[in-house]
Amino acid sequence: MSLWKSYGASVRGPGHMATGVPNQDAWASFHRVWGDGIVVSDGVGSKPFSNVGSDAACFAVKQAACAWRDDPDSAPHVLLGHIRSLWLSSVAPLAPSDCAATCLFAFRLRDRLHMGMLGDGLAAAIRSDGSVLSLVEDKSQGFSNITMALSPSVSPQDWRYVSLPVAECTAVLLCTDGVSDDLDNPDGFVSGLVDACRPLAAASASRHMRYMLGNWPTPRHTDDKTIACLYREEATYE
């Protein structure tokens, strides 16, 4: 029997600590009878309420996944459209343009693992054979320094999305660009981090993650940093 668990952490970057700005990243996890999942969001730094937007993104994904459980065979655009609608409702009465945030998610629903990404960062699934499947932001249609984010005009076509059989996936790692932009070997980072934390209890893994992010080795880094992991644990009975 397989159990899905999660851990994660989010820390303010040195730039925001120096200026007194709150953490604009957010993450969340959920574990229900019908499914398990994680969400990571990075509020767009130039927006005055981006921290509200990132919290709302986490709420929207959890609610959308719950609603989708009753019709998991519907097209993915139904799920992605519902996330946008729930996010817009959650940030109201603030202007959505003041709350823009990226959105990365992964959740298990029945026998499928759904992974989506809007904006930058890293969303990577570790397959049972040890290979890593990563989603990357497509900036071919715009300027390289502009990232997609939740907004009234965002469409399902703006998302990167993939669905895998649960049996083919052992873990998913999501992180904001404060982490992913500093990685020279993303696949190696994902595999190494998941392997290092796998023997730990979820609470211990989260503490380890917070320590690692708080002592990030890249010189002169300034951004907030968030990582979340959803992993499969094989239950054993004696």
Image: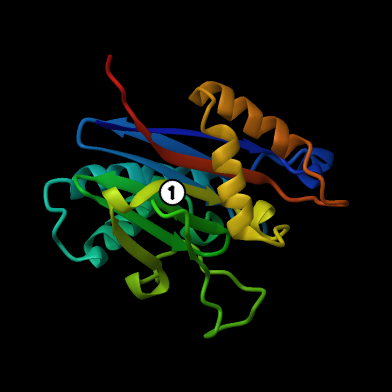
Nearer to the camera, 207 or 166: 166
Q: Is residue 102 visible?
A: no
Q: Residue furthest front?
A: 238
Q: Residues within 10 Å of mark 1 (few under 14, many from 20)?
A: many
Report how many numbered discs are placed on residues in the image. 1
Which residue, given by chain and number where applicable, does mark 1 sit on? Answer: 57
In the rendered view, tell whether residue 155 sits above or below residue 204: below
Relative side of 199 to 81, left or right: right
Please name the residue shown 49% across and 25% down the image. 202
In the rendered view, tell whether residue 110 sits above or below residue 150: above
Q: Is residue 169 visible?
A: yes
Give residue 14's quadrant in the image: top right
Measuring from the top left, give residue 116's x and y in whole percent: 39, 59
Relative side of 23 to 233, left or right: right
Please name the residue shown 68% across and 53% down the image. 178
Q: Residue furthest right?
A: 219
Relative side of 149 to 129, left or right: right
What amino acid type is highlighted by mark number 1? Ala
Measuring from the top left, give residue 210's x and y in whole percent: 66, 32
Measuring from the top left, give residue 4's x and y in whole percent: 35, 34
Disc 1 is placed on an element classified as helix
Colouring method of the image: rainbow
In the rendered view, tell whether residue 3 sits above or below residue 90: above
Nearer to the camera, 122 or 96: 122
